[in-house]
Amino acid sequence: MNRVYLILLFVAGVSVQSVGQTRSTGTPAAPQPRQATPTHPATQQPAAPANTAYSGSPSVRPIPESDMMYRRTVWRVIDLREKQNRPLYSVNHEVTKIIMDAVKRGELTVYKDDSLKKTMTPDEYRKTLVKPGEEIVETEEDRQARLEADKQLAQIEAAKRRQQGAKYVAPPPTESAAMGPIEYNPRDIKKLELKEDVIFDKKRSRMYYQINAVTLKVPNAVTGFDDVIGAFAYKDLEKVFRNHPQEAIWYNMQNNASHLNLADAFDLRMFGSYIKKVSNPNDDDLATIHGGSEQAILAAQRALEEMIEFEYSLWSY
């Protein structure tokens, strides 16, 4: 019974309190309408200028700097004429063809060098594809001859039109032969230059080879040096290789049923190369430092052995 009385008293007190609030205000307080938060149109970010550096890391799997115990930047040259690099250079599946076709489709950005700081315009890229000494220039004599030929053709067509009258059918328009320079084709490009970081990751306790840029180079028959066709961020190249698995293949000569994707081939280091330059204060290549190409070959081998020995020396048993 006591519990029942207590419940009744509590209900009565609540009712009296609510009635008093209603009398003091006259009417029950109406709920306040919720004010709408003003919305502002999203501001569109300005487009980046065309001639800018690559944003972000150009490698596929960048390693945080806090995890790096050792890092050296190395430039390697892949000579596609070597036997061990033939899988990268199979007919109609050349790695150079895959890259050049991707540029034509607009899937790749071309940079002037492997620093990836300045892009090439389409006109600049087309100029790099022109073979030296093979430019075709229309002289004034050639231009006059072409204009005279066009004039004679126009006179012949006019005479036919007068003779045949309404029965005359005009021939389809034909364009004159294009006068232009002779360009390199994918099989003319014989070398790839890789810029990569050799990093010892202290968190995973192993060495990693982090490719940052790939540069196409072609031998110049006039100067004797290699000309740069263009440089590409490896992260962009890896996307192209993955998006075109039927074309971007590493040719397996032992088993045609198990060709590899070019991205996997680069990850597995399935290519032959030699070291051209190791990072140094003067930014000189090994041939300049050691005074000749023969000494540079020996220096490249020593640099490779030093990096391997450094990794092995970190362990003690």
Image (cartoon, rainbow, N blue to C red):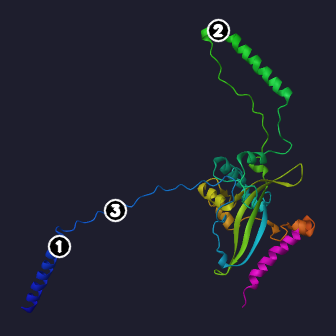
Residue type at tag 2: Gln
Which residue is painted at 84% across and 55% down in the image?
226
Look at the image and tell me whether residue 259 can be seen.
no
Relative image position of residue 216 (x, y in whole percent):
76, 55
Which residue is painted at 63% across and 57% down in the image?
241
Confirm whether the magenta stretch covers residue 68: no
Relative image position of residue 268 (x, y in whole percent):
68, 68
Relative image position of residue 294 (x, y in whole percent):
91, 66
Name the residue beneath numbered marker 1. 24
Residue type at tag 1: Ser
Name the residue beneath numbered marker 3. 35
**Label 1 SS:** helix
Q: Residues within 10 Å of mark 1 (few under 14, many from 20)?
A: few
Of all residues shown, which one is farthest toward the right?
291
Which residue is painted at 74% across and 49% down in the image?
186
Residue type at tag 3: Gln
Name the main secondary structure of what is drawn in magenta. helix
Depicted 60 relative to depicted 220: above or below: below
Label 2 – label 3 distance at C-alpha: 83 Å
Label 3 – label 1 distance at C-alpha: 27 Å
Name the residue beneath numbered marker 2. 164
Sequence-wise, the earlier of marks 1 and 2 is 1
In the image, which is nearer the foreground, mark 2 or mark 3?
A: 3
Look at the image and tell me whether residue 113 can be seen.
yes
